[in-house]
Amino acid sequence: MDRQKQLKKLLKEVFGYKDFRLEQSNIINSVLDGNDTMAIMPTGGGKSLCYQIPALFGDGLCVVISPLISLMKDQVINLKQNGVEGHFLNSSLSSDERREVERKLRRGEVKILYIAPEGILSQYILNLLSEVKLNLFAIDEAHCVSQWGHEFRKDYTKLSILKDTFPSVPILALTATADKRTREDMAHQLRLKNFNTYICSFDRPNIQYTICERENEIEQLDEFIQKFHKNDTGIVYCLSRKKVETITEKLKDLGYHAISYHAGLSSEERNRNQEIFSSADQVIVVATIAFGMGIDRPDVRFVAHLDLPKSLESYYQETGRAGRDGKEASAWMLYGLSDVVKLSRMLEMTEASEEYKQYARFKLDFMLSLCETTSCRRKMLLSYFDEHIDDCGNCDCCLEPQEMWDATKEAQMMLSCVYRTGQLYGSSYLIEVLRGSKNAKVLDRGHDTLSVYGIGKDVDKKVWDALLRQLLMTNYIAIKNFEYRTLALTSRSKELLRGEVSLKLRKKKEEGQVKIIQKILSGSAHTSHGREDLFEKLRGLRMDIAKEMKVPPYVIFNDKTLHDMCNIMPRSKDEMLMVNGVGQSKHEKYGDQFLKVIGEYI
């Protein structure tokens, strides 16, 4: 039997899948040929199979560098459910458990070992691995090795020691997000030699993008969830720990099963909440970006951002945690002027090099451009990763094209106000002056006597906020003092003041954001089999087994597999093995129970 047939046989018998997806086959063959390989695949694209299949095909041990203990645990549980001997070495193990894993490694009984980057750097572990036959190092979340990546981790930069210590063992670098500069840095830091690079499409067509201006965030979030995801599991991202706690409490008050996750919680609380998120239905986790890498749950139906991410890489990575099962999901975000000021201040207050800051400013500008665009959001998002598509027809901008209005006159008012108040004030104060506020601060400073005082009283505050975002994004004004958030003119200001250029803005819709989303999501919840009652029975059985086994339900079978059972309606072992996601090991464990429920339904 040739290699490709053997690989497909492994894929079906162990994991229950009929065919490889995206670039999986090419990546696997590159690794098996002994080549260093870089794989850029979207979240949910099946990165883990790219090292699991080679590990099972060849002799020896595959070592996976993974950044999170929770991810290691989930991966090992999944492997064991599929009949694969996988283990991890990390701080969660007792001394006896650790010694047992080491004994199995020396006896050659382990196919895949997960270990943290800081763990593999220890001389003890390096010595241990030198006693074992190795066939591959797989580095997950490999963008963490690059300072240009969005989740840089210092320990990752030391992984070049793998090439020094084990020069003949190929390295597979895996990530979902890396632009050209980050990819080049990854290859340099890991010392990849004559490596092959495979870049899959970044498009996640099942995710529907909607970005709205912030008005009352908790009311907007509640309305969004109630209308479209009332009984779904989701993630809500916030920038600060304090906001995470506040939003969690507000969601609880509204009757949601909401839990918090951020770095300020104890490890016990984080682990407990991670387990709740993995196993409970209809749960919403409110989190900072600390809740990120390692989320393996396939049925997250929405990801909401209440604060602007720092970059499109972060946004793509975070929204990609929705709909990993391929079913329809929502990426919904609120943003406002305060986000621009806050993120700019955070960047400028760091001690990073000017080169890094300049690159980070570029990333933030692109993120803002995605928010302000009136054209297809997916098209713009993918263009950032050098991928080009036609308008998607599945984002708010495509489904509800926005009218534009000429904001040149209002922009000139704002720039004049910035100049005449001495370039010493922030956005809220400038808007007060333009709208003719009787605020004591305005009057005490004598700004009610300026020619710009009150000239914008007929313009809504929300319009002024939107205008300021545009002026900041297009560099017609800049943040002068980050501590006090004061605004100043730039070298570009003159061309707008003189009328040499014009500025066009989106006209605010009369209809609300919920109506727009309804047009996006209409009909998305329907399935092809029409056997929702059977699907619920199978879900109930899955939950009972998961509770008994003390594992997340999706580890037994994911929703996609249950839906496939509803489509195929298997009545025998052979027919059950035709179901996507049912391999030999899982059929032996659970097949008869699921066949019984289907038989009773028939």
Image (tube, helix red, strand yellow):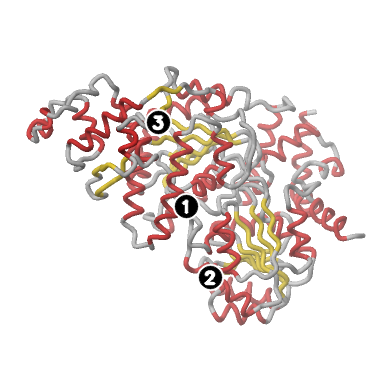
**Viewer-proximal residue, 211 or 184?**
184
Name the amino acid, label 2. Ser
Give the residue displayed 77% in from the left and 54% down from the top.
25
Q: Which residue is mark 1?
A: 272
Secondary structure at badge 2 equals loop
Question: Taking 551 as reference, is 232 above or below it?
Answer: above
Q: Quadrant of the N terminus?
A: bottom right
Q: Name the N-terminal-most of marks 1 and 3.
A: 3
Residue 389 shown left or right of residue 251 in the figure: right
Question: Taking 206 as reference, is 6 above or below it?
Answer: below
Name the amino acid, label 1. Arg
Q: Which mark is residue 213?
A: 3
Give the residue displayed 65% in from the left and 41% down from the top.
325
Residue 32 shown left or right of residue 46 in the figure: right
- Residue 429: x and y in percent read 20, 35
Name the amino acid, label 3. Glu
Picture quadrant where residue 194 is located:
bottom right
- Numbered disc in front, either 2 or 3: 3
- Residue 600: x and y in percent read 78, 31
Q: Name the N-terminal-most of marks 2 and 1.
A: 2
Q: Which mark is residue 94?
A: 2
- Numbered disc in front, either 1 or 3: 3
**Viewer-proximal residue, 66 or 102?**
66
Hey, which residue is sitting farthest right in the picture?
1
Residue 575 shown left or right of residue 546 in the figure: right
